[in-house]
C-alpha cells in the first residue's frame, strides 16, 4: 500500500507468526502419525505423485496398489481430489518438512483475517480478529492436518484481500492476484470457492450496473475488474483441462468419476455403498446441528466468541439501518469499510445457505443425535471453515466496541486512572472465564484425537527405525484400500521406491505382486487387535520378513501349546475341508505335521484320525488354513489357526513362509483381533512354533 509499517502491522505479524507456531506444534505433537480422517493420506499420496512428476499411478496391478479414494481406470489409479492442495503439500515433502506448510497456511489464514478486519474496521480490531481466529478450536485442529479446508480458505482470503486493494489502490496487478487466487481456489474446491466469491461477484456486477449510463466510469471499472474475471476464468479453463486429461471429460470431475452421486444437491446420495435420501428437511436439520456445534464448541472460548460475533453483527446491522443511503456507498476509488462489512455478511450467508445442499454436512455428524460423534467432534465443522473470517471479524468488532464503550462511559466519571483500574478489573475477571471456556472446548477433541494418535503409535512401531527396503504386504481392516487406515505408508509414483506397499489379499494376487518384484525382499505387516472406529482397543503390530519357498514337496510342522484337551484338526482351502480327530496325548505341546504338494495338501501326523477323504486339493493357488482346536473345562474352545499361501507351478509348489497365525477363543476364525504376534498377551500356556523342511 506504499506506507511504512506501524505498531498495528507489527502486532498483527506477531499474532500471525504465533498462529503458525501453534499449528506446527499441534500438527507435530497431536497428529504426528496423521489423524483419524484418512483423507490426509489421499492428499499426501497425491502430493508424492506430483513431486515425482505424475498425475496418477500406472500399473497393471491396480488392485494391489489401490489407494483410498483413488479411481481405478484400466491400468491407471488417480485421486478423486484436485491437485492444487496436494501441490502445496508437495512443497513441504520436497523440503522434508511437510508440516511447515501447515504452519505457513495457519499464519496466512490468521494474518489475512486480521488484515481484512482492519480493512473493514481498524488496526486494533484486526489484531483482535486474528487472535480470535487462532483461539478457535476449528482453526487449531483442522489447520493442523493435511486436509484441504484451511489451504482453500487461504486462497479465498488472498482473493478477498487483493479484491479490496484493487479498488483502494487502482492497481491492476491486484486484479490479477485476485483472479489467480480465486481461480486456484476453484481448481482446489470449486463449490467452496463459489460460495465464498458469490458476494464479491454480486458486488462487482452492482458496481457496473450503478454506472451503466456513465461511459468513462464504466470503462474504468471494467478495466479494473477485467483482470479478475480473465485470470479467474483462465483457471476455470485449467480446471476443465485437468478434468479432460484425468477423467477423459472436461465436465467430469475426478470426485464425480469416483462416486457420481457424491455431490451437491438433494435426493439419492451414495458413496462406497453408503447411501441416503438427502431431503431438504434432513439437510436443514443436519446443517442446523452443525452450526449449533460450531457456535457452542468451535469458536474462540465458546460460546463467548459467538456472543461477541453476535454483538458485532448486531451493531453493524443497527448502524446500517440508521445510516443515510450514501453511507454504505462504494465509490470509484475504493471499497468502503461499510461495504466490506456488508460483503462479509453476504459471505456468511452464502456459506451457510450453500452448505445446506451438500450432504457432507450430514456425514460429519455420524449420529445426528450425538454432537460428540463423527468427524465434527474431533476437527469441528470443517466444511464451514470459511466462516472463521466473518465470525472473527464481527467477534473482534463486538469486543472492541464493548471495551471502548466501557472506557468512554467510565472515563466520564473516574478519569484516566480510574478507567485503567476498572478495565484492569474487567480483564482480571474475564481472562479466567475465557480460559475455562477455551479449555473446556479443547479438552474433548484433543483427548479423542490423542487416543487415535496412541493407536497409530502402536501400529507404526515396527517402522520406528525406518521403512524396510523391499515389498511390504499391508493388511486390509477396512477393505482393499491402501492408506485406509495406514495412511503413513505411501508409495512412489513409479511403485519402484526403496519400499513398496501392496495390499495383502488372496494368494493368487499376492503371488502376482511377488512375481513383479522378483529381486525384492518381502515383508508382511500385521497386527493383533481389533481395528474399528473406536480407538480404545489395543494394537500390537509386527513386521515379519517373508520367504518364498518352491519345491516338489514342503513338510510343515505346526507346534502349539496345550491349553485344554486336544479335540480336532481341520485343514481347508476355503472350498474343501478335511477334519481329523486327535487321539494322541500331546503333553505340554502338540506338533502337527502336514505336507503341501502341487495341487494338494495332506496331514501326515501320527496320532490323528481322519474323517473321510484325507486330502485337500486346489487349482492354481489357495490359502491353506490349518486349525488345531482345544476344548477347555466348561466347553470353551481355543483354536490355533495357521494360514499359508500356496501355488501350484507345474511339478512344484510355492508357498509363502512363515504362515499367518491366529489364536482364537470360542471361534475357529478370528482374523486380526487375535493374530499371533511377538509381544502380544495371550491365555496362559499359549505358544506357537513353526518349521518347514
Image (spheres, rainbow, N blue to C red):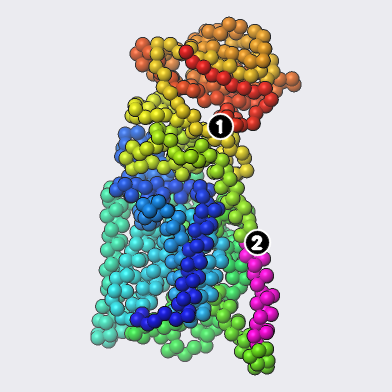
Q: Residue at x 37, y 82 (%)?
A: 3
For residue 119, which quarter of the picture? bottom left
Q: Is residue 523 above or below residue 8?
A: above
Q: Is residue 348 above or below residue 634?
A: below
> Which secondary structure type mostly characterizes the magenta part of the structure?
helix
Provide the residue span drawn in magenta: 419-441
Q: Earlier in the sequence, mark 2 or mark 1?
A: 2
Q: Residues within 10 Å of mark 2 (few under 14, many from 20)?
A: some
Q: Is residue 460 above or below residue 135?
A: above
Q: Secondary structure at mark 1?
A: helix
Q: Residue 52: where, in percent of width, then height?
A: 31, 47
Q: Residue 104: where, in percent of width, then height?
A: 43, 62
How many marks are shown on the rendered structure?
2
Q: Secondary structure at mark 2?
A: helix
Q: Residue at x 35, y 33 (%)?
A: 61
Q: Is residue 475 left or right of residue 511?
A: right
Question: How far separated are the C-alphas under marks 2 and 1?
Answer: 37 Å
Q: Residue at x 36, y 16 (%)?
A: 649
- In this view of the protein, can residue 277 be seen by the observer? yes
Give the number of the disc on residue 672. 1
Q: Is residue 529 above or below residue 173?
A: above
Viewer-proximal residue, 576 or 511?
511
- Residue at which label 2 appears: 440
Amino acid at each position: 500500500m506504499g506506507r511504512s509499517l506501524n505498531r498495528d502491522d507489527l502486532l498483527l505479524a506477531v499474532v500471525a507468526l504465533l498462529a503458525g507456531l501453534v499449528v506446527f506444534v499441534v500438527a507435530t505433537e497431536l497428529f504426528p502419525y496423521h489423524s483419524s480422517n484418512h483423507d490426509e493420506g489421499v492428499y499426501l499420496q497425491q502430493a508424492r505423485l506430483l513431486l515425482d512428476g505424475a498425475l496418477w499411478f500406472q500399473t497393471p496391478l491396480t488392485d494391489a496398489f489401490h489407494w483410498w479414494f483413488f479411481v481405478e481406470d484400466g491400468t491407471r489409479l488417480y485421486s478423486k481430489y484436485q491437485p492444487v492442495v496436494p501441490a502445496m503439500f508437495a512443497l513441504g515433502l520436497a523440503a522434508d518438512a511437510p508440516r511447515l506448510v501447515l504452519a505457513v497456511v495457519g499464519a496466512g489464514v490468521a494474518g489475512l483475517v486480521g488484515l481484512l478486519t482492519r480493512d473493514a474496521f481498524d488496526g486494533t480490531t484486526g489484531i483482535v480478529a486474528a487472535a480470535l481466529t487462532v483461539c478457535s478450536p476449528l482453526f487449531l485442529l483442522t489447520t493442523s492436518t493435511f486436509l484441504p479446508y484451511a489451504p482453500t480458505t487461504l486462497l479465498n482470503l488472498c482473493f478477498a484481500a487483493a479484491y479490496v486493494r484493487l479498488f483502494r489502490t487502482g492497481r491492476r496487478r491486484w486484479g490479477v492476484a485476485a483472479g489467480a487466487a480465486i481461480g486456484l481456489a476453484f481448481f482446489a474446491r470449486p463449490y467452496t470457492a463459489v460460495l465464498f466469491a458469490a458476494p464479491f461477484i454480486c458486488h462487482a456486477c452492482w458496481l457496473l450496473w450503478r454506472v451503466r449510463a456513465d461511459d468513462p466510469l464504466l470503462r474504468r471499472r471494467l478495466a479494473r475488474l477485467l483482470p479478475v474475471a480473465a485470470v479467474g476464468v483462465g483457471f476455470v479453463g485449467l480446471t476443465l483441462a485437468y478434468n479432460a486429461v484425468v477423467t477423459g471429460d472436461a465436465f467430469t470431475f475426478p470426485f464425480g468419476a469416483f462416486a457420481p452421486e457424491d455431490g451437491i444437491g438433494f435426493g439419492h446420495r451414495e458413496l462406497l455403498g453408503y447411501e441416503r435420501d438427502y431431503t431438504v428437511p434432513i439437510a436443514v436439520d443436519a446443517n442446523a446441528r452443525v452450526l449449533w456445534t460450531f457456535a457452542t464448541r468451535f469458536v474462540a472460548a465458546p460460546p463467548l466468541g459467538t456472543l461477541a460475533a453476535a454483538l458485532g453483527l448486531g451493531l453493524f446491522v443497527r448502524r446500517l439501518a440508521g445510516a443515510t443511503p450514501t453511507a454504505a456507498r462504494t465509490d470509484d476509488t475504493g471499497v468502503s469499510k461499510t461495504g466490506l462489512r456488508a460483503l462479509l455478511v453476504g459471505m456468511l450467508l452464502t456459506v451457510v445457505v450453500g452448505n445446506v445442499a451438500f450432504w457432507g454436512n450430514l456425514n460429519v455428524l455420524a449420529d445426528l443425535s450425538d454432537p460428540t460423534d463423527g468427524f465434527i467432534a474431533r476437527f469441528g465443522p470443517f466444511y464451514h471453515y470459511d466462516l472463521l473470517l466473518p465470525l472473527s471479524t464481527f467477534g473482534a468488532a463486538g469486543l472492541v466496541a464493548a471495551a471502548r464503550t466501557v472506557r468512554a462511559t467510565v472515563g466520564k466519571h473516574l478519569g484516566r486512572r480510574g478507567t485503567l483500574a476498572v478495565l484492569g478489573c474487567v480483564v482480571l475477571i474475564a481472562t479466567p472465564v475465557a480460559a475455562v471456556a477455551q479449555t473446556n472446548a479443547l479438552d474433548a477433541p484433543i483427548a479423542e484425537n490423542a487416543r487415535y494418535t496412541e493407536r497409530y503409535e502402536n501400529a507404526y512401531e515396527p517402522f520406528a527405525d525406518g521403512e524396510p527396503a523391499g515389498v511390504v504386504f499391508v493388511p486390509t481392516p477396512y477393505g482393499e484400500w491402501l492408506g485406509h487406515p495406514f495412511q503413513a505408508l505411501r508409495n512412489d509414483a513409479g511403485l519402484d521406491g526403496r519400499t513398496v506397499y501392496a495390499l495383502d489379499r488372496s494368494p493368487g494376487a499376492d503371488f502376482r505382486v511377488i512375481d513383479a518384484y522378483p529381486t525384492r525382499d518381502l515383508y508382511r505387516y500385521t497386527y493383533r487387535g481389533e481395528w474399528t472406529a473406536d480407538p480404545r482397543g489395543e494394537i500390537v503390530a509386527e513386521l515379519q520378513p517373508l520367504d518364498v519357498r518352491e519345491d516338489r514337496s514342503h513338510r510343515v510342522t505346526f507346534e502349539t501349546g496345550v491349553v485344554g484337551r486336544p479335540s480336532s484338526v481341520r485343514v481347508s482351502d476355503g472350498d474343501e475341508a478335511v477334519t481329523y480327530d486327535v487321539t494322541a496325548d500331546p503333553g505340554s505341546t502338540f506338533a502337527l505335521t502336514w505336507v503341501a504338494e502341487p495341487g494338494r495338501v495332506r496331514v501326515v501326523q501320527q496320532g490323528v484320525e481322519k474323517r473321510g477323504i484325507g486330502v485337500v486339493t486346489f487349482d492354481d493357488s489357495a490359502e491353506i488354513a490349518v486349525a488345531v482346536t482345544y476344548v477347555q473345562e466348561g466347553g470353551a474352545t481355543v483354536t490355533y489357526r495357521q494360514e499359508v499361501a500356496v501355488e501350484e507351478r507345474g511339478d512344484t509348489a510355492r508357498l509363502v513362509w512363515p504362515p499367518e497365525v491366529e489364536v482364537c477363543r470360542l471361534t475357529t476364525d478370528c482374523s486380526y483381533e487375535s493374530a499371533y504376534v511377538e509381544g502380544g498377551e495371550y491365555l496362559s500356556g499359549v505358544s506357537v512354533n513353526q518349521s518347514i523342511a
